[in-house]
Image: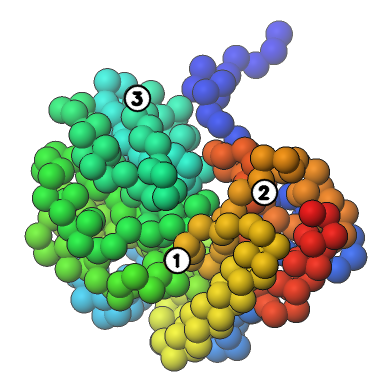
Amino acid sequence: MSLQFASALRRIPVYPAGVGYARGGPLVRLESNESPYPPIPEVVAAASAVLTGVNRYPDPDSTVLREALSARYGVPAEQIAVGNGSCDILLAVGGALLEPGTEVVYAWPSFSVYPQLEAISGARAVVVPLDDDECHDLDAMAKAITPATRLVLICNPNNPTSTAIEFDAIARFMERVPDHVCVMLDEAYCEFNTLNDPDVSLKLLTYHQNLVLLRTFSKVYGLCGLRVGYALCASPELPRALKLIRQPFFLNAAAQAAATEALAHPDEVARRVDSAHVSRAELRVRLRALGLSPAPSQANFCWFDVGPQRDEASIVDGLAEQGVLVRAGSALGKEGALRVSCGTKEENARFIEVLTALL
């Protein structure tokens, strides 16, 4: 007799993780929007220093890290939730807010984890297409909110399309959202956004008790391998709810120490943002020289259509055969597109070299 699994398992879409981890030889890794630079030495040292004590459990409340985040952003520590990556917090928010008979609203294509919330919780997903510029259609999203809506997700800058919405548009949107609806502004790539100051959204926490800003140490801080995310909440209500439904000790000691130390080096973060801007501009220029039209990126990656006469899968496979890994648009919600992380100058050059030969 075979095991009987929960029916929800049949509804959960598989997260389309990057491929190529098992490939041998040198690789150009442009598939997962990681930082091309290793963490700074002080961060590595901070993580290493706690390893002699890992026979003990880590602080279950991540007190030092939350206090450091509080000092950085001016948000009380009791209004900050941390997690094993921002996905951990996102799924926990879904578990705390969603259930059968409720609704979650999000745009599409957007972050690939969002569809899991519907499948896991039994809530109904109201999916709003992006506009013609591949940006969130906030007017359509506001109109999609009903009395059953519990959660609205806005990915800004948006993954995978790299586009962003200006602060004023988000502020106007928040005025239209009923107080019973939690709005999660997913800002994993906000540090790379040049439309507004990356921290301008903090202003909205003062006026909207239903707002959550979701951020991560994976991207600009280069800590993907340690998995640290955090949520800045307008009130302590949501962090308290998340504690009830998550496993204990969800954020390991090395991750807590590394993230805390990373916050102490804003100048190095600023330098890495500048490098990403240069890489992004260079990549966009070279893509346009090939006759391609990348979206106006505000992230650390580029998104573009390959064109109606070209096969997306053949291009992705051809790049991989030459050791260049990128993400196929079909896995991210739009067939016929590619998402390419901004790498080092040498990585970008190799990608363009191989892509040129394939096209």
Residue 48 as seen in the image, left or right of residue 143: right
Q: Nearer the viewer, residue 313 or 59?
A: 313
- The disc, 3 or 2, on the residue closer to the chain's N-terminal end is 3
* Residue linked to disc 3: 124
Measured in 3D between alpha carbons, the distance from the residue under mark 2 to the one under mark 1, in whole angstroms, is: 20 Å
Residue at 56% x, 72% y: name it: 280
Q: Nearer the viewer, residue 258 or 119?
A: 119
Q: In the image, residue 66 lies at what x, y percent?
A: 32, 70
Q: Secondary structure at mark 1?
A: loop
Mark 1 against mark 3, which lies toward the viewer? 1
* Residue linked to disc 1: 298
Measured in 3D between alpha carbons, the distance from the residue under mark 3 to the one under mark 2, in whole angstroms, is: 33 Å
The answer to whether 147 is drawn above or below residue 323 in the figure is above
Measured in 3D between alpha carbons, the distance from the residue under mark 1 to the one under mark 3, in whole angstroms, is: 30 Å
Mark 3 against mark 2, which lies toward the viewer? 2
* Residue linked to disc 2: 306
